[in-house]
Amino acid sequence: MDFPRNLYIETANNEGHSAEFLTTTLGYIDSLTVKNLPVIFSLKHFSLLIGMDMSDVIKIIRNRNNRYSYYLIKKKKGGFRRIVAPYKDLKFMQSWIKENILDKINASQQATGFIKGRSILHNAKNHENSTVILNLDLSNFFETITEKRIYGIFSSLGYSKNLAVEFAKICSAQMPKDKFDSMPPEKQEYFSEIYQLKESVLVQGAPTSPNLSNLVCRRLDLRFSKLANKLGVNYSRYADDITFSGNENNLPSIGILKKIIEDEDFKINWDKVGKYKQGQRQIVTGLLIDGKVRVPKKFKKEIYRHLHFCSKYGAFSHFQRICPDKRYRKEWLLGKIYFVFAIEPVEAKKMLEIANNINWEI
């Protein structure tokens, strides 16, 4: 998004602006263009760029807390994951910010989640065939990132204070009392933690949240990377999933990691801390890394089981028996196969050969 710098200078001179004004605004323009970021002077300017009336933009920002849907999705291992999804108009604004601003800023090299060209495979390969690995998770990752920290990101990119404040509001929210009170008790159980937060935080379902979380974690990644280099071990992070690997005597202590994590205003999820030696089941972001990186046998076995019963009894009969309420059954199973394809293409091709001979009239 090129900014017409020469036209701006000509217009400013024609309107009689002072040399001081021109110097200040050109400095602002150049600080953004050098980073390939769109030049935006104000909320009104932002409204023009995204093609919305400023009055609507202001209304959405002021009422942003009420412009989210709160729902649960089932986890594979039981329980539910809470999702907070923005309404269409707010999501449009967030998507514009993501595509035109956040996508243009590089995360750290150690971050492997939510980044084009990187994946759980890249994350796992950092630790392939290691003597020992240390896994830990950050607790309530997105919800730990406050509106104030999001403001800091936009401000550090070079945007004016007032605009950084508005961008931070667009990308964060606080759960309203009426939304929480309208939920049944079993649903409130999952949302009570974020309802009790006293400030706006990064929102789980917003398109801007993954990028912002990586940018907020740049200093954490830098500190962990320096520590890993000093100790002669490997470090990578996939969202809230942190892994160190190397020799057992060289791995950082949990105490040091805890101090750094808390210094960066995050917390450890102690239920997911684990150290695994060779000979034990070493898993990094869902993939086995002892030897060559591969998909766990149980996951592949489940796919072959579905393929077998679909071939034997027909896809409709099989899925009607095990999950009558599941929609897109073919897509669900093929999605699992394509996941395997990204890690073990030879194995996935065998699965696809079976799948191509199944009658999918379901």
Image (cartoon, rainbow, N blue to C red):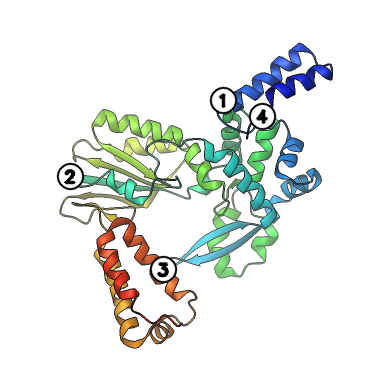
Q: Quadrant of residue 151?
A: top right
The amino acid beneath tag 2 is: Thr
For residue 34, the mark is 1
First along the sequence among labels 1 and 2: 1
Query: How busy is the neighbourhood of tag 1: few (under 14 within 10 Å), some, or many (20 plus)?
Result: few
The amino acid beneath tag 4 is: Phe
Say which residue appears at 75% left-offset and 16% top-offset.
21
First along the sequence among labels 4 and 2: 4
The amino acid beneath tag 1 is: Val
Q: Quadrant of residue 318?
A: bottom left
Give how far apart the Cα atoms at labels 2 and 3 are: 32 Å
Say which residue appears at 43% left-offset and 70% top-offset.
332
For residue 85, the mark is none
Q: The N terminus lies in which quarter of the figure?
A: top right
Q: Which residue is tagged 2?
A: 131
The secondary element bearing badge 2 is classed as loop
Q: Which residue is tagged 4?
A: 3
Query: How busy is the neighbourhood of tag 3: few (under 14 within 10 Å), some, or many (20 plus)?
Result: few
- How far from the left and from the top, in percent, is residue 305? 29, 77
* 103 left or right of 316 in image: right
First along the sequence among labels 3 and 1: 1
**Numbered disc in front, either 3 or 1:** 1
Q: Which residue is tagged 3?
A: 78
The secondary element bearing badge 1 is classed as loop
First along the sequence among labels 2 and 3: 3
**Numbered disc in front, either 4 or 2:** 4
Give how far apart the Cα atoms at labels 4 and 2 are: 52 Å
